[in-house]
Amino acid sequence: MKVVHVVESFSAGVLDFIRSLVEGIPDFEHTIIHGTREDTPYNVGALFPDETGFHLWKHAGREIRPLRDVMALAELMAPLRRMRNSDVVHLHSSKAGFIGRVACSMLGLQQKVVYSPNGAAFMRRDVSSAKSGIYKRLEQFAARLGGRVVCSCRSEQEEFLKAGIPAMSINNGICCSGAQGGRSDPRTLVIGTANRITAQKNPALFNEIARHFSGDAVCSFVWIGDGEMRDKVTSPNIRKTGWVSMEKLDELLGSIDIYLSTALWEGLPLSALYAMCAGKPMLLSNCTGHRDIVRSGVNGYLFEDLDEAVAHISKLKQDRELLAALGQRSRDIVMKEFSLDKMIEQYRALYKALAAL
């Protein structure tokens, strides 16, 4: 079987997600048509199995720019036309999802399409309601062109269904087989996140939370990652690591006590799943994706604002037994409900069903 993946950019979790599919279904032939961004790894091809095919999609871009988008459509149709005997065309994220469905519809490939939104554009909270409404109408139009919308979690699926767009969900999953990260130093409390420093992740709120504890000798913060809004992370008690390898990410997640995410919207964030695997309590903003992985009072807490986040941190700072118990349950949940094997099994079945059409 042949699978073509189309992605506007290998940014953050999308790269890990596609790599998991390619490595997890090695008996299928995988080709990746991709654009680039500032945070796309320079040697991205080296991160995949040697037999993976690659095609650069030069005109792909995140924002809506009509002229460039028309050029991107024409550019995408050329390799898809050559590969029209493929069994599946898997589109990743909003821009590739829209342009890819237009291209596949024009080429008669719509029955072969899988679209993974990974946090759809109409869910954005960093744009006006008018702009998010435009994004929703574009999603509704693209859905009428055909293909299967496969969300990364139940809460993301619910947002599509509310918008009148048929959708199913397959939970993102990770391989959680390593040892649980351990920290039990009562003298310090390290609160960390692993994310791009972008508007979606709301770095200003993360900075406010850290600033609240800036005079506290016990609490410190770490942001694992980088991005264009790095200037919003200025509190003196925050350490910024920049981009790190997966091995270093595991080490850094093991060295924190609480995983904190202030994101405005999400698909199902792999970074949070990695932290759960490391046995860390979750303290996450109440948004899509986050609601699927937090069981309030069981493995962590959801919060609505600065005051609520600060209150939870203050409570956990004083109760190390609760901190440890929440972390252990995080690991139990990720191993039971968000395993990579389960995700791969479901995508394999979906690919085979589409190939049989």
Image: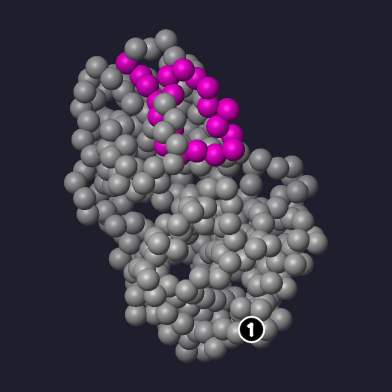
- Residue at 50% of width from left, 29% of height from top? 206
Which structural element holds mark 1?
helix
Determine the residue located farthest toward the right in the rendered image.
Answer: 67
- Residue at 34% of width from left, 12% of height from top? 217
The residue range painted magenta reads 218-238
Q: Residue at label 1?
A: 81
Q: Is residue 145 above or below residue 220?
A: below
Q: Amino acid at mark 1?
A: Arg
Residue 283 position within the rendered picture, expressed as x and y whole percent measured from the top left: 41, 34
- Residue at 47% of width from left, 89% of height from top? 356
Q: Quadrant of the N terminus?
A: bottom left
Q: Is residue 308 above or below residue 25?
A: above
Residue 55 position within the rendered picture, expressed as x and y whole percent measured from the top left: 55, 71
Q: Is residue 32 left or right of residue 107?
A: left
The front one of 46 and 67 is: 46
Q: Is residue 221 magenta?
A: yes
Q: Quick check: can you spot residue 269?
A: yes
Residue 267 position within the rendered picture, expressed as x and y whole percent measured from the top left: 51, 53
Q: Is residue 9 above or below residue 150?
A: above
Q: Is residue 337 left or right of residue 149?
A: left
Q: Is residue 350 magenta?
A: no
Q: Is residue 111 above or below residue 223?
A: below
- Residue at 56% of width from left, 83% of height from top? 83
Residue 309 position within the rendered picture, expressed as x and y whole percent measured from the top left: 46, 27
